[in-house]
Structures are given as structure tokens and as C-alpha cells.
Amino acid sequence: MTGLLTTPAPQRTKESGPQRKGRGGHGPGTVRAFRATPFTYATLIIVAAILTMPLVFVGSIALSSDATVNTNSFTLFPTEFHWENFTRVFGSELPMGRFLINSVIISLCSVAGQMLSSGLVGYAFARLRAPGKNALFLIVIATMMIPTQITMIPQFILFRDLGWVNTYLPLIVPNFFSNAFNVFLVRQFVSRLPSQLDEAAMVDGLGFFGIYRRIMLPMLWPVLIAIGIFTLTHTWGDFMGPLIYLNDESKMPLSLGIQYITSTSAAGQSPAWNLVMVGSVLLALPMIIVYYLGQKYLYEMDISGGSAGVK
């Protein structure tokens, strides 16, 4: 009898069987890390060298002498180092120092406007409940497909009727109404944050603005700083906007003032390309520094998935 009551051997199923491992002991769903090879590093070095050559050439021209400029005998790598060109450009007939101050004023005010408005509008689209909210958001996103050239003339007529031509207002005020890309960026970021944070704050008596100021705003800093970097990069090097709205030389930013260096030379004389390139270095160097200091926020905004503030 005991031989008839033996327990049958357990059958191996797909769930109970051992999982097959890939190469290197990784599971079937494991993403293996990319291993760089010497060919990868060689390719990156070549590409980086090609992309760096224009900057090196700009620096070489900026450090060249007036005799080199007159003969147009520029070299790719600098062979002479006239650092006094960086002080000469401020002693020229043009108010380069004033150009630089104007760029700082316009850029910082624009950054403040974009960070303030983008955070509020993006948070509203992500959290507030209102009829037609999704349709309105689609309309806002659709404005990204409208070329800037189409709205250029209507905007000029509007600002002219307001008496804003030849002032900083047409360059600054529109940034306090955000833009579609920044609103989309904040809205997607806030949507990934847990809604339980809002519900707990409402239980404690906070309204929507209090929730934004005390809870959402600290977590939004990575994306807001990224928006500030994008806005600063655009406004610092903007040429078309100041060219349309500014007529007074004392109000022009650096991006517009640099081209005046080429128009101050005598007839038949080569422009002072060394001073022009000095102005280009002054225009590009702050953006390089800003990106270097703020790149961790750009990476954190990209990979955090909306959880940077709760780490």
C-alpha cells in the first residue's frame, strides 16, 4: 500500500524553471551597459576636434595684430597673442561696455519672466481641473508650428501703437507670457509628480497657489533652471529682435553692437576683424560658462522623470 501512495515528482513549469541568462550572466530583460572601445574614443576625439576648430579660429583672429588683419594672413592656430585687443574694444568709438550692460539687462529680465510664467502656466495645465483645459493645451502646443516670421509684422505694429519701439519692453514683456515649449516642459514635469502631495497639502488647508509655492516650486527648480538657460541662450545672442525694435545706439545689446564694428572702418579699408572676433568671444564666453555651471540641472531634468525634488 505504501508503494501505491508515493508522491508524484513535481513537474517543471516555465514559472518554476530556472531563468535563462544572457551573456555575462545578465537576465533576458536586463539592459547591458555600453562598453566604449578605442574606436569609440577615437571617433569622439575627431568629432570634438572638428567642432572645436571654429572656436579656435575665432580665438586666433581675436589675438592677431592689426598688421595681420590688414594683410588677411590669419592662421588656424594663434601665432601671436595680443591680449590688449580685449581692452582696446572697450576703448573704441562704440560704447561696447554699454552694449554689454544692455545685454545683461535684457537677458536677466527675460529669464525672470520665462521662469515665473512658465512655472505657473505649466502647473495650472497639469493640476487644475477646468472644462476645455486639454483643448486649450493643444491650442498652445499648436502655436509651436507657427513660424516667427509670420507674427513679426503684427507684433511690430502692436508694439508701435503701444509706443514701445526703441525701448526694452518689446524684448522683455513677451517673456512674461511664457511660450509653448516651456509650458509643455513644466506641464510634463509636474504630471509625473505624485498627486498625493497636492491632496495632503489641501487637507492641511493650502490652496493651489500655496501648493505651488511651498511644494511644487522646490521640486521644479531643475526644469526652471533649464528654462532659464534656454531663455538666456536665446536672448543673449538675439540679433533680429533688437534690430527691429531698437534705434538708439545706447540701447543696443552686444549682439547688435558687434556688427557696428564692421561699419566704422574707412572706405576701402578692411574691418578690424580682430576686434570683431573679440566681441564674438565676449558674446559666446558667458553662454559657455552658464552651460558649464548649469549642465547638472539639464541632466537632472532629463533623467529624473519629475522626481528630482523628492530624492
Image (cartoon, rainbow, N blue to C red):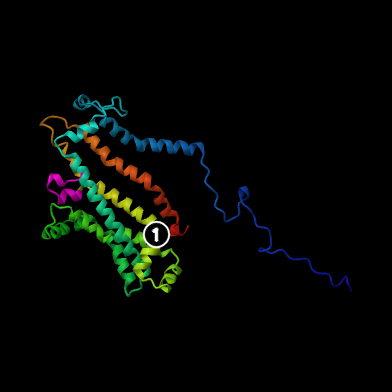
The image shows residue 214, relative to residue 229, as above or below, that is below
Q: Amino acid at mark 1?
A: Pro
Please state which of residues 106 and 43 is positioned toward the viewer in this rendering: 106
Q: Is residue 309 found inside the magenta-colored segment of the image?
A: no
Residues packed near mark 1 inside 10 Å, few (<14), some (14 to 19) or many (20 plus): some
Q: Main secondary structure of the magenta part?
A: helix
Please state which of residues 199 and 65 is positioned toward the viewer in this rendering: 199
Which residue of the protein is positioned furthest toward the front in this rendering? 204
Name the spot of residue 136 as percent of width and height, x first: 30, 69
Which residue of the protein is positioned furthest toward the bottom in this rendering? 131
Give the image quarter of residue 17. bottom right
Give the image quarter of residue 90. top left
Give the image quarter of residue 49. top left
Name the spot of residue 83 as percent of width and height, x first: 26, 29
Is residue 254 visible to the viewer in this orientation of the structure? Answer: no
**Residue position for label 1:** 218
Residue pictured at 23% horizontal, 49% vertical: 105
Residue pictured at 36% horizontal, 73% vertical: 129
Which stretch is magenta? 240-253
Name the spot of residue 273 as percent of width and height, x first: 21, 32
Which residue of the protein is positioned furthest toward the right in this rendering? 1
The image shows residue 295, relative to residue 140, as above or below, that is above
User: From the viewer's perspective, is 32 left or right of 44?
Assistant: right
* Number of numbered markers: 1
Is residue 257 visible to the viewer in this orientation of the structure? Answer: yes
Q: Is residue 242 found inside the magenta-colored segment of the image?
A: yes
